[in-house]
Amino acid sequence: MNGINKAVTVLLGSVLVGVGVNWLLIPHRLMDGGMIGIGLLAKYYLQLSPGLIMLAVSIPIYGIVFLYDRSLFYNSFHGLFLTSFFIDLLSPLRAWNPFPIEVSAVTGGVMIGAGIGSMLAYRSNTGGTDLLAQFLAYRTGIPVALLILLIDGVIVVGSWEAIGTYRMVFSVITIMAVAAATHAFSRIGKPKDRWEIVRPPRR
């Protein structure tokens, strides 16, 4: 049953990422971070398929993880393939965005973060820098959402020349929404920390 739950979650998470990228980010030329951001830069600069670029750039990172953490590798590669597939498959959604940039930045970030976080809850991910963040989080104890936020921030700030200051500001909002949603959804099924549980004192 856990295998079925994981397969369904990874599939739905990949669809959420694909919808968020195509329906909400690309029409406004907004950025995300990580491998999705690298794929978007390839789209904005060279009109290449972002999903295909994500797949190609992730291969070296998967090679490293294969050498040091086979379990994480086997749990993760299908998330990368599905996410890359749906990002390119759902490209027709780019013509149907009715929302202003403010709404798209926040909603797109939450949708992408929900997809990524759901996959992280089952030890899968979208590959690339998300996989690298998960690999480092297991070894350092740093929250994976924080590592993703830091990596995403570097990529988004580096995209300034491609998207300009105005879109970069809203792209920063997007990655903050991604990080918040990733953290919330990645804790699905996990016990709450003691300070999150409020109970009346025993008498």
Image: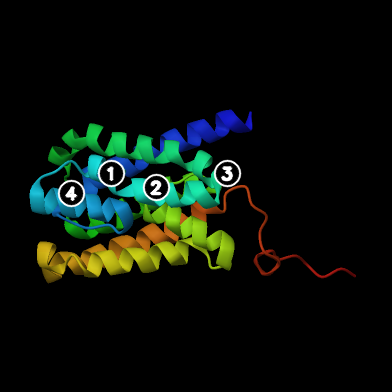
Q: Are marks 1 and 3 in contact (CB under 8 Å)?
A: no
Residue 106 visible here: yes
The answer to whether 107 is drawn above or below residue 81 in the figure is below
Q: Residue furthest front?
A: 67
Q: Are marks 1 and 4 in contact (CB under 8 Å)?
A: no
- What residue would you read off at disc 3? 71
Task: Tell me the crowding category of disc 2: few under 14, some 14 to 19, or many 20 or more residues within 10 angstroms, Cα based.
Answer: many
Q: Secondary structure at mark 1?
A: helix
The answer to whether 49 is drawn above or below residue 200 in the figure is above
Question: Which three-letter amino acid code belongs to the residue tagged 2?
Answer: Gly
- The first of marks 3 and 2 along the sequence is 3
The answer to whether 32 is drawn above or below residue 165 in the figure is above
In this view, the residue in front, 129 or 94, is 129
Question: Which three-letter amino acid code belongs to the residue tagged 1?
Answer: Ala
In this view, the residue in front, 99 or 74, is 74
Q: In which quarter of the view is residue 30 placed?
A: bottom left
Q: For the residues carrying marks 4 and 2, which lies nearer the camera in this image?
A: 2
- What residue would you read off at disc 2? 127
Q: What is the spatial separation of the Cα atoms under label 1 and label 3, in whole angstroms?
A: 21 Å
Q: Secondary structure at mark 3?
A: helix
Q: What is the spatial separation of the Cα atoms under label 1 and label 4, in whole angstroms?
A: 20 Å
Quadrant containing the C terminus is bottom right
Residue under the point 12% across and 52% down: 44
- What residue would you read off at disc 1? 56
Residue under the point 11% across and 67% down: 161
Q: Position of residue 105 (x, y in %)?
A: 25, 58
- What residue would you read off at disc 4? 26
Q: What is the spatial separation of the Cα atoms under label 3 and label 4, in whole angstroms?
A: 34 Å
The answer to whether 73 is drawn above or below residue 41 in the figure is above
Q: In which quarter of the view is residue 78 placed?
A: top left
